[in-house]
Amino acid sequence: MTVVAGLIFAAVCLSVAITGFLSMGDITDPAQLSDAKGFAWFWAFLGGVALSFTALAQWMARTQKEE
């Protein structure tokens, strides 16, 4: 269940990041463009962290020894 929830959260984060990167074409103000890049990179980072923890949870589930 952890892996499924992690993948859903990562997909949401990465979709917000992609939307942020794609919407930068309409911004002409340099300050707003810088803020938009920071916003998009933050969500991309958050998605990457979510994917990392999801991969770690998957690895832990596969390598767990049954007692």
Image: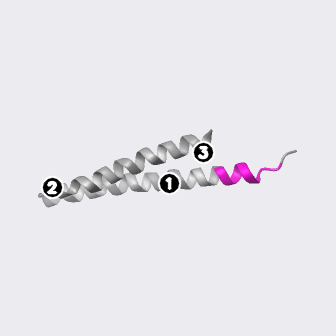
Residue annotated with mark 2: 27
Q: Residue furthest left?
A: 28
Residue annotated with mark 1: 49
Mark 2 or 1, which is nearer the eye?
2
Q: Which residues are magenta?
A: 58-65
Q: Main secondary structure of the magenta part?
A: helix
Is 38 positioned to the left or the right of 57 in the image?
A: left
- In three-dimensional space, the C-alpha distance between marks 2 and 3, rounded to whole angstroms, equals 37 Å
Residue 42 pos. (x, y %): 37, 54
- In three-dimensional space, the C-alpha distance between marks 3 and 1, rounded to whole angstroms, equals 13 Å
Say which element carries label 3: helix
Residue count near mark 2 (Cα–Cα under 10 Å), binned few <14, some 14–19, many ≥20: few
Amino acid on which the number 2 mark rests in the picture: Ile
Residue count near mark 3 (Cα–Cα under 10 Å), binned few <14, some 14–19, many ≥20: some
Say which element carries label 1: helix
Residue drawn at the location 44% of the way across and 52% of the way down: 46
Q: Quadrant of residue 26?
A: bottom left
- Of mark 2 and mark 1, the one earlier in the sequence is 2
- In three-dimensional space, the C-alpha distance between marks 2 and 1, rounded to whole angstroms, equals 28 Å
- Of mark 3 and mark 1, the one earlier in the sequence is 3
